[in-house]
Each structure stands twice: as C-alpha cells, then as structure tokens.
C-alpha cells in the first residue's frame, strides 16, 4: 500500500512541476513579445524586470537574446531542464 502512495505522490509532484514550467515559460514568452512591441527588439531577463514586463527574474528559465535583438531563446534550468513548450 505504501508503494502505491509513493507512486501517486510522485506523479502529482511531477505534474505540478510540469505545470509550473509551462506557466513560467508562457509568462516569459508573453513578456518578451510585449517588450519587443515597445522597444526595437527583445530583452534580457533583467530588462524585462526593469521594463515592468516581469515582477521578478525566473528561477526556472534563462533568456538568451541574439546580439541583433531580433531573436531570443528560453532555456529551462533546475526542474525545467529539458522542458519542451507545448504546441
């Protein structure tokens, strides 16, 4: 019986982590698009925070902006390492 409980809790925890990753990723993508609409390109994490697009930096993802400012990459860290955005 204890084994079943451990597997059930593990599954719930994994779904919670996946949900947190998906939500944080979507927030970052939306923030980047809003930032780019007001500026000449995409912004770093700190620029998104100082620009009022994020309340705080993410601890689940990093953002790398292309030197041209015309592209960015969101990379998962920690629990979100290897996260692949749905769609």
Image: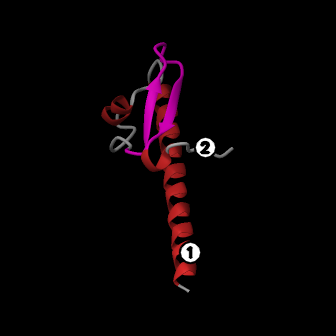
In the orientation shown, which residue stands out farthest toward the left?
50
Quarter occupied by residue 50? top left
Residue 33 position within the rendered picture, expressed as x and y whole percent measured from the top left: 52, 32
Instruction: Return the residue at label 1.
Output: 8
- Residue tagged 2: 85
Q: Residue at horizontal 45%, vertical 26%?
A: 64
The secondary element bearing badge 1 is classed as: helix
Q: Residue at x 52, y 29 (%)?
A: 73
Q: Position of residue 12 (x, y in %)?
A: 54, 69
Decide: few, some or many residues near mark 1? Use Cα within 10 Å; few <14, some 14-19, many ≥20.
few
Q: Is residue 61 left or right of residue 22?
A: left
Q: Nearer the viewer, residue 16 or 35?
A: 16
Q: Give me the residue at 51% from left, 75% from top.
A: 6
Residue farthest to the bottom?
Answer: 1
Front residue (pair 51, 16): 16
**Which-is-in-front pick, marks 2 and 1?**
1
Direction from residue 64 to residue 4 in the image, left or right? right
Question: Quadrant of the image for the C terminus?
Answer: top right
When the figure is inspected, residue 67 is found, relative to residue 56, above or below; the finding is above
- Answer above or below: position of 49 versus 83: above
Residue 9 against residue 31 in the figure, above or below: below
The part of the chain drawn in magenta is 59-77
Q: Position of residue 60 (x, y in %)?
A: 42, 45
User: Which of the pair 82/58 is nearer the observer?
Assistant: 82
């Amino acid at each position: 019986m204890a084994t079943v409980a451990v597997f059930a809790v593990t599954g719930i925890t994994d779904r919670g982590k996946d949900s947190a990753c998906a939500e944080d990723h979507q927030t970052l993508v939306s923030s980047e698009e809003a930032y780019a609409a007001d500026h000449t390109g995409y912004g770093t994490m700190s620029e998104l925070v100082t620009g009022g697009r994020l309340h705080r930096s993410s601890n689940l993802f990093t953002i790398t902006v292309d030197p041209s400012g015309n592209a960015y990459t969101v990379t998962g860290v920690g629990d979100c390492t290897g996260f692949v955005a749905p769609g």
